[in-house]
Amino acid sequence: MTIFGNERRLFLENETETEQLGGELARLARKAEEGLTVFLDGELGMGKTTLSRGVMRELGHEGAVKSPTYTLVEPYEHLEPPVYHFDFYRLGDAEELEYMGIRDYFASQSIRIIEWPERGKGVLPAPDLEIHLERQGQGRSVVMRAGSELGASLLNDIELIGPDL
């Protein structure tokens, strides 16, 4: 039996381990065969896009993965499941998300990765997983919190990359 709100903490030494964590999330999401919403939180340069790149690489994407700061969303519809990578850093008002048809992205069994989710507050649905990245020495401390049964299940099944904190 899983519990909502459960939490995992770990330390990632470098960019490679951050990408590996993204790959592990992708592997588990594919296995679950459900749509997954992940909120990524952390200051600039903490590895949000690096983690996102790990998701896309695990699902077979070979090209560049950059943060869609100006376009708000970068679709990776050729992947299985499809991935929508959002970056709301430059979002002026959460209501702008309604104009871009944000709800349509949540109507499928895709993976939705959202950087700067607090800027979409009031419009975005609750996440399955919230991941907070923070600088710790040369690496990153990571706190992952479940917001749904799916998120709790993923946290229970995840094979940790770095050591638990």
Image (cartoon, grey):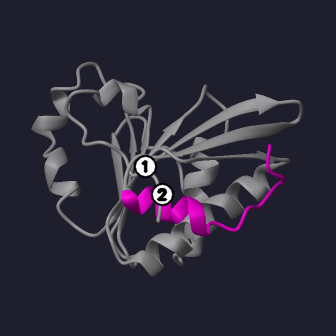
Q: Quadrant of the C terminus?
A: top right
Amino acid type of the residue that numbered disc 1 sits on in the rendered structure: Phe
Q: Which residue is mark 2?
A: 152
Would you identify the image quadrant in which residue 149 lies?
Answer: bottom left
Q: Whole-percent x and y of residue 2? A: 47, 61
Q: Whole-percent x and y of residue 48? A: 58, 42
Above or below residue 46? Residue 148 is below
Residue stretch in magenta: 149-165
Would you identify the image quadrant in which residue 19 lies?
Answer: bottom right
Badge 1 element = loop
Are the residues tagged 2 and 1 within 8 Å (C-beta)? yes
In the image, is residue 159 part of the stretch drawn in magenta?
yes
Is residue 24 something that shows in the picture?
yes
In the picture, measured across the screen, residue 18 lies left or right of residue 22, that is right
Above or below residue 104? Residue 143 is above
Q: Which residue is mark 1?
A: 4
Sequence-first tag of 2 and 1? 1
Above or below residue 93? Residue 50 is below
Badge 2 element = helix
In the picture, measured across the screen, residue 92 lies left or right of residue 118, that is left
* Dot label at residue 109: none
Instruction: Compute the Cα span from label 2 to label 1.
Output: 6 Å
Q: Residue at x 78, y 58 (%)?
A: 16
Q: Residue furthest front?
A: 1
Q: Whole-percent x and y of residue 116? A: 44, 31
In the picture, measured across the screen, residue 3 lies left or right of residue 112, that is right
Amino acid type of the residue that numbered disc 2 sits on in the rendered structure: Ala
Near-viewer residue (52 or 29): 29
